[in-house]
Structures are given as structure tokens and as C-alpha cells.
Image (spheres, rainbow, N blue to C red):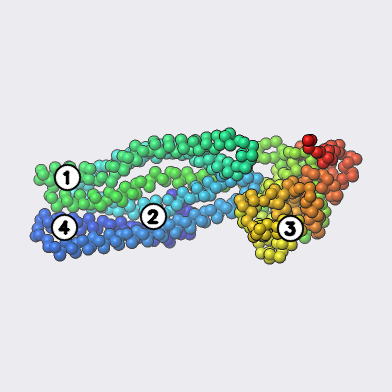
């Protein structure tokens, strides 16, 4: 609870006021029992009360009950305002934290993992802030105070009132112990299910095309079944304990009524005292049960907070304080070595310079480290050793925003938001006018196909751009890059989905980008980068050769093989 309340620090005023109001509502809720006791005592002891007395008593009871509801409603409203404000701040804080985390690590864990942490686990804290803390304290303090009144009135009835509490606490402790043991497996199965659902839905087109609905569904069904089993086992172990708590704890008269009646019949207790203590017993049963029923949630909440915090622990990518974009937009890799966590090195002692106003192409076999070079430049991870410089400064000296303003990255795994084409391109420059967006689309050779759509630039592209072809999506992301107008542009297999008819147009757009820019292209079609100022050949994480196209054809055996393979595939025809 302490950790939870640390996150609610900005809403302490609302929380304290909510506690006060709910505290008053619990007190007011006890008054009707005192009035009822007074009526019963008057009936027993005399003189006989009048109809007027009954009416007044009924009115007072109604007023107290209404006041209790009003105070409780205002208190709950304030506590929920504080709760949802706190959840917003937590989600914003952890969302900001992801900006400093290695982007590669985030992508490895998957969107389902972070969805569970930021949405589900943080959402579970609403119970703690809005209910446990705010309602728990008043609903414990007031019953304790009433118990003291009963003990002062008659110590025997006070002890009898406490009779059911040890049984309930024992059941509560057993339930919490079981829950703590099963909690890690439950959360792990829930996280796995989140990832599986997102993967299953995202890959539905592939599943159907290749007829893998049965095999794919088996994995989905298995994870759903596992989650069901963990959830069922957890709750089924708790049912007996919950039954004991739910029956014994609210029934505070389970001992006071029979034993108190025996004491009265034997002359050791007056009827007035019996009635008075029984009324107070009825008054504390509901709030006491309400307070103690929150207790099993506390370990769950502590686990959720710890799980969220641990998910965002670890070193983020290193950033500095330099917020001025470099005057010279050249890129230099100096003896860069990199490995994913504890695995073998992916890049080994790579050094090269990409000069300003030039086109540098990086080629090589698949898995050789080409895309990793590009992602290190845009700070997916920190280099293991060596450094990457932009404008003569280590990229770790720049603020994250400055580096991202300086470099525009177009990945082979392009992503479009479920919005219009106009807004998807405008992401490159949020305050750009419609005319600027259209100009960028023209430069990226996608204006014509956009205009041919029924709603033109207002066309919604669907989830992940699903309403467009792969080539169309790629061209829109290139238009986004053109609109951003960064001095350094990195294209990671940017022409991968572009058909032959439009490839020349895209290459022309890339040439337009080169004006006063540093362009780095990761390419698999060597024909598209033959005119590059510099071609780097990467194999097994090492830079094995560099130079212009003609030079490499003469001096680099690997480049010769890649070029020959490209020429051969270009002439392929389907047999009939």
C-alpha cells in the first residue's frame, strides 16, 4: 500500500477528504441502530411511546440513511477521481519511461507484454486507491470504536462480539497464503495470453492464406486453457475460505444472541443491555466485513506494482543534454561492436563514415548485420563498444528528441495508424499544412494512387494499414520521411515492397532527398544502389569491403556474387 500511495501523492487532498466523508458516512450509518435501540428500550421499560414518537424516529432514521448515502457517494466520487488521476500519471510516467528504454528490447518483449503492464496491472491499482485505502480505514476504525463501547457497556458481550473474528482472520490468512503462492503463475499465464491474442489476431491473414487455422488455433486455445486453469485453481482454493469469511464475519450476533439470551434469562444481564449490545453488533457487521474483504487484494496489488516497476527497470539508452541539431550531418561509426544481451557479437569492430550530401548503401547476405547498423544509428540500443557520431558528436550526447529530429528512419516493417492517409503522412511533421502533405506524397510517388481512392487523402487505411498494399504502405512511410525533412535519412529495405513499375519513381524520390542530406540505404536490390557514392559490404557482422559499384565488382568476391545473383533473379520467368 505504501508504494501505491506514493504514486497518489498529487491527489492526497482528494483522498484525505474522501476518507473523512466516508468516515462520517459510516458514523451516520450507525445512528439508526441507536434510534432503534432507544425505541425498543422505551417499549420494554416504558412509558409507552406515541405514534408521533415513531414517526419522528422514522424520519430521523431516513435522514441519517440518506445522509450516509450522500456522504458515501461524494467520498467515493473523490476517491475515484484521485484513483483515475493517479493511474493516468502512472501510465504517462511509464509511457515516458519506454522512450528511454532500448527500443529493440521493447519490440522483443512484444506489445501484449506492455499492454498488460500499462493497462491491466496499473488498472488493478484502482481498487487500492479508490476503495481499500479510502473505505478500508473508516470501516475498520468505526467498528473498533463501537466494540470499545460494547466492552465498556458489558465486557462479556464485548468478548462474545469478538468471537467470530479469529475464525475469519484465520480463513483470511490461509486464503492470502494460497494466493501468494499461485500469483506468479497466474500473472505469467495472463501475460502470455495477452501476447498470444495479439499475435493471433495480427497474423490472421497469414494463418488463413496458408491454411494453418487448426495449428495456429491450438496455440491460442492452449494459452487460453492455461490461463483458465490458473485462474480457476486460484479462485477454487479461495472459495472455502471466502465462504467462512462471508458467513462468520458479518454475523457478529452468532455468539452474543444465544449466550446473551442465556445471561439475561439467568439474571446476569439486563434486557436493555442485551438489546443495546445486539443493536451495536448489527451495526458493525457490514462495515467490518467490507473492510476485511479488501485484505486479500493487498498482496495482489503489491505484486502488480512490483511487476510493473520491474518491467521498466534496467538501463535505458544513454542520452545527453545537447539539444541543438548538428551543423554538419555526417555519420561516423568508430570500432562499433554490438551483441543482443549475452549472445555472440552481431557487429564486430565496424568503422565507416557517411559524408553529408551523399548516398551510402549497405549491402550483404541476410542476417549479416545490415539492419542492426541502421537501428544502432537511430538508438534502438547503445553500442556495446566503440561509438557512433553524428555531426562530430557521440549520439549519446544528444537528447532523444534532438536525435530523432536529426534522423528519419524508414523501416522495412512499416507501420500505419488506423487513421486517414493525410494524418498518417502528417505524423512526419504534425503542424504541416495539407499542401505540404500532398507535396511530400507527390515526391514519394504516391499522390496518384491516393487520388484514385474513393475518399482520396481522407481514406482510412485500417488497422496497421491493412486496406493498402505493401507497396502503397511503404510509399506512404517514405512520404512521411520526406515531410519530416531531417538532415539524415535512413532507409532500411525501403523499396522491399515496391513493384518494378514504381521502383524508379521511389528511387527518384530518394534522389530528391539527397539535397543537403545524408542518406543511408539498407538494400537487397543492388541494381537500385549501383549509383551510390559509397557501398558498404557487410558479412557476419563485419565490414568486409567498401567503395563504389565499379570498384567492388573488381575487388570484392562477395559483392560480385550478390550482383550476379541479383542479375540472375531479374531475368527469371515463370514456366508454363
Mark 1 or 3, which is nearer the eye?
A: 3
Q: Nearer the viewer, mark 3 or mark 2?
A: 3
Looking at the rendered structure, which numbered label has been put on residue 260? Answer: 1
Q: Left or right: where does residue 29 sit relative to residue 439? A: left
In what element is the residue under mark 2?
Answer: helix
Element carrying mark 1:
helix
Q: Nearer the viewer, mark 2 or mark 4?
A: 4
| Mark toward the start of the polypeptide (3 vs 2) | 2
Nearest to viewer (mark 3 / mark 4): 3
> Could you tell me residue 420's position as x and y percent?
63, 58
Labels 3 & 2 near each other (Cβ < 8 A): no
Q: Which quarter of the picture shows residue 78?
A: bottom left
Q: Pointer 2: residues within 10 angstroms few (<14), some, or many (20+)?
A: many
Q: CA distance from mark 1 to mark 4?
A: 20 Å
Q: CA distance from mark 3 to mark 4?
A: 87 Å
First in sequence: mark 1 vs mark 3: 1
Q: Residues within 10 Å of mark 1 (few under 14, many from 20)?
A: many
Query: Alpha carbon of mark 2 to alpha carbon of mark 4: how far?
Result: 33 Å
Residue 239 relative to residue 357: left or right: left
Residue at 82% across / 44% down in the picture?
Answer: 526
Which of the two discs, 2 and 1, labels the residue nearer the N terminus?
A: 2
Asked if one can make out residue 355 in the rendered structure from this viewpoint, the answer is no
Mark sitting on residue 39: 4
Which residue occupies the foreground of this view, 192 or 24?
192
* Towards the viewer: 172 or 106: 106
Q: Which residue is mark 3?
A: 448
Q: Which mark is residue 172?
A: none
Amino acid at each position: 500500500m505504501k508504494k501505491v500511495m506514493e504514486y497518489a501523492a498529487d491527489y492526497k487532498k482528494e483522498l484525505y477528504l474522501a476518507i473523512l466523508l466516508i468516515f462520517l458516512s459510516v458514523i451516520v450509518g450507525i445512528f439508526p441502530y441507536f434510534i432503534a435501540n432507544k425505541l425498543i428500550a422505551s417499549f420494554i421499560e416504558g412509558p409507552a411511546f406515541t405514534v408521533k414518537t415513531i414517526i419522528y424516529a422514522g424520519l430521523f432514521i431516513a435522514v441519517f440513511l440518506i445522509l450516509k448515502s450522500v456522504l458515501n457517494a461524494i467520498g467515493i466520487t473523490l476517491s475515484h477521481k484521485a484513483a483515475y488521476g493517479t493511474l493516468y500519471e502512472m501510465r504517462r510516467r511509464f509511457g515516458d519511461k519506454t522512450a528511454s528504454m532500448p527500443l529493440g528490447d521493447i519490440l522483443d518483449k512484444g506489445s501484449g507484454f506492455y499492454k498488460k503492464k500499462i493497462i491491466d496491472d496499473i488498472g488493478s491499482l484502482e481498487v487500492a486507491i479508490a476503495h481499500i485505502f479510502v473505505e478500508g480505514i473508516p470501516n475498520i476504525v468505526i467498528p473498533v470504536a463501537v466494540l470499545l463501547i460494547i466492552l465498556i457497556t458489558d465486557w462479556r458481550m464485548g468478548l462474545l462480539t469478538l468471537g467470530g473474528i479469529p475464525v475469519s482472520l484465520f480463513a483470511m490468512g490461509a486464503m492470502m497464503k494460497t494466493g501468494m503462492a499461485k500469483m506468479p503463475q497466474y500473472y505469467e499465464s495472463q501475460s502470455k495470453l495477452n501476447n498470444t491474442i495479439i499475435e493471433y489476431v495480427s497474423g490472421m491473414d497469414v494463418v488463413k492464406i496458408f491454411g494453418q487455422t487448426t495449428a495456429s488455433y491450438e496455440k491460442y486455445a492452449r494459452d487460453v486453457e492455461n490461463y483458465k486453469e490458473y485462474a480457476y485453481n486460484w479462485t477454487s482454493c479461495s472459495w472455502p475460505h471466502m465462504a467462512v469469511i462471508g458467513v462468520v464475519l458479518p454475523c457478529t450476533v452468532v455468539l452474543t444472541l444465544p449466550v446473551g439470551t442465556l445471561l439475561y434469562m439467568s439474571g446476569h444481564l439486563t434486557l436493555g443491555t442485551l438489546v443495546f449490545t445486539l443493536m451495536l453488533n448489527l451495526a458493525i457487521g457490514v462495515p467490518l466485513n467490507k473492510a476485511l474483504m479488501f485484505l486479500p487484494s493487498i498482496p495482489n496489488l503489491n505484486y502488480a506494482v512490483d511487476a510493473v516497476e520491474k518491467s521498466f527497470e534496467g538501463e535505458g539508452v544513454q542520452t545527453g543534454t545537447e539539444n541543438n541539431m548538428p551543423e554538419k550531418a555526417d555519420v561516423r561509426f568508430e570500432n562499433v561492436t554490438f551483441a543482443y544481451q549475452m549472445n555472440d557479437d552481431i557487429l564486430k569492430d565496424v568503422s565507416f563514415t557517411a559524408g553529408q550530401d551523399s548516398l551510402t548503401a549497405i549491402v550483404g547476405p541476410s542476417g549479416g548485420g545490415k539492419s542492426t547498423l541502421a537501428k544502432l544509428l537511430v538508438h534502438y540500443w547503445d553500442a556495446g563498444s566503440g561509438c557512433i557520431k553524428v555531426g562530430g558528436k557521440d549520439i549519446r550526447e544528444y537528447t532523444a528528441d534532438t536525435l530523432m529530429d536529426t534522423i528519419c528512419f524508414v523501416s522495412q516493417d512499416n507501420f500505419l495508424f488506423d487513421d486517414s492517409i493525410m494524418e498518417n503522412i502528417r505524423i512526419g511533421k504534425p503542424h504541416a499544412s495539407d499542401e505540404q502533405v500532398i507535396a511530400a506524397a507527390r515526391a514519394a510517388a504516391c499522390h496518384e494512387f491516393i487520388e484514385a481512392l474513393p475518399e482520396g487523402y481522407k481514406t482510412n487505411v485500417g488497422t496497421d494499414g491493412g486496406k493498402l498494399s505493401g507497396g502503397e504502405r511503404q510509399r506512404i512511410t517514405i512520404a512521411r520521411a520526406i515531410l519530416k525533412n531531417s538532415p539524415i535519412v535512413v532507409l532500411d529495405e525501403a523499396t522491399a515492397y515496391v513493384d518494378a513499375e514504381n521502383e524508379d519513381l521511389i528511387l527518384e524520390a530518394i534522389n530528391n532527398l539527397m539535397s543537403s542530406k545524408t542518406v543511408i540505404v539498407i538494400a537487397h536490390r543492388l541494381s537500385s544502389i549501383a549509383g551510390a557514392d559509397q557501398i558498404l559490404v557487410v558479412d557476419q557482422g563485419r565490414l568486409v569491403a567498401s567503395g563504389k559499384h565499379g570498384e567492388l565488382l573488381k575487388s570484392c568476391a562477395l559483392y560480385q556474387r550478390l550482383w550476379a545473383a541479383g542479375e540472375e533473379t531479374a531475368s527469371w520467368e515463370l514456366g508454363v
